[in-house]
Amino acid sequence: MTNHKGIPVPLGSRESLRCEGCGVKLQTEDRTKLGYVPDQALDKEPVICQRCFRIKHYNDLSGTTLNQDDFLAILGSIAATDSLVVHIVDLFDFQGSLIPGLQRFIGNNPVLLVVNKTDLLPKATNLNRLRNWVQREAKEFGLRTVDVVLVSAKKNAGFDQLLERMDEYRKGRDVYVVGATNVGKSTLINRLIRDYSDLEAELTTSPYPGTTLGLVHIPLDDGKSIIDTPGIVYRHRLTELVNKQDLPVLLPSGALKPKVYQLNEGQTIFFGAFARFDFVKGERQSFTCYMSEALKLHRTKLERADELYAEHKGTLLAPPVLEHLEELPPLTKHAVRIPQGAKMDVLLSGLGWITATGTFAADLVIWAPKGVKVAIRPALI
Ligand code: GDP
């Protein structure tokens, strides 16, 4: 065995070895403590502690994506197991990030629904109300969930509860983690691995993480594993269609700042050149846009909207800029009617949503790239 400079280290000097990943003093005695490295791994190069090994390999192995068929084959294989399924969804694109038909694929295994990115909601959001909303919407979607956990991987919120619930519902079984791409699955699992010393103890055990069929096995103390599945790419989410350079514009960086527009019928709002909202008919009323702050909104007259788009898409109306615009499918129309008395959101999957107060009925036309999911739902906020 050699040290980090390649100089042979006598066996007796092992105690003074440091991890080449994080610099912690290595030890082979207590796998629940920092610096633990299994005896046999001391002969590997470079010598790193098990925690670094796990993080390194998780990062190498996570972030793989799959097409629908391969993904469904993996989901289908979960049906034959006895496990807990943790389904991570993105609060910013709730309906767009749920896995259609999940329940059919995974058989009788219970689903714990983890709603990530709660940091995007305004601070005053009532979490109980939100949980009820999530439960109703998930049920509407055909998902039977044992429980709902609200988390923010970014802000480190809701983790204790997530660990508690996972432990409660897995009942000594494996845990499969499933989700669409960009819901924050990698961020969440990295947080689980890095930040929680309890889990740290729970996770620190051999065998090492490994993959089969693109599945990352993160070993648990009781011989079971957390199994991370590849993220599924849904082409009904705008985030999966845009050029990677435009993705940061779509993904909100912090708590959503609602933009309120008082509109008369015959007015239009453009969301960059990604989408368009026409208020076709109805009394003057307000519409509230919940989108990334980085996205530029442009208000105009409906009668001018076609012309404006033709002349200024990719320039005044951007992003996407012209060269990226060509990568997007053409905008197609969706007619939406908001009845009086119903406070509703119009969701554009991956872009955000627009809330209509329902003070008056409203006839809307939404233009979104062909294939992008447009849906209405009871207002989230
Ligand atoms: P994955 O494709 O599901 O593994 O998603 P990633 O972990 O790569 O995250 C996708 C994007 O969402 C990245 O830009 C993350 O920074 C962001 N993200 C992940 N978790 C959160 C969160 O809790 N809050 C917010 N606001 N963004 C998040």
Image (cartoon, helix red, strand yellow):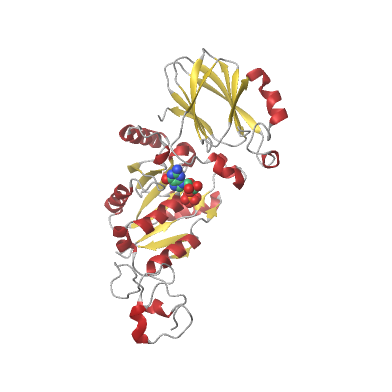
Extreme right residue here? 311
Question: Where, quadrant-wise, is the C terminus in this rendering?
Answer: top left
Query: Which of the pair 230/351 is nearer the observer?
Result: 351
Q: Residue at x 56, y 35 (%)?
A: 295
| Image location (x, y in percent) of residue 259 | 49, 27
Q: Residue furthest top?
A: 283
> Can see residue 372?
yes
Residue 206, position in %: x, y? 36, 70
Answer above or below: position of 302 versus 156: above
Residue 254, compared with residue 309, is above or below; it is below
Q: Could you tell me how many numbered marks the image carries?
A: 0
Q: Residue at x 27, y 55 (%)?
A: 171
Quadrant of the drawing holding the N terminus: bottom left
The quarter holding residue 151 reads top left
Tell me where residue 210 appears, x and y as whole percent: 44, 66
* Residue 102 makes an appearance in the image: no
Q: Residue at x 38, y 49 (%)?
A: 86
Residue 148 drawn at (x, y percent): 34, 42
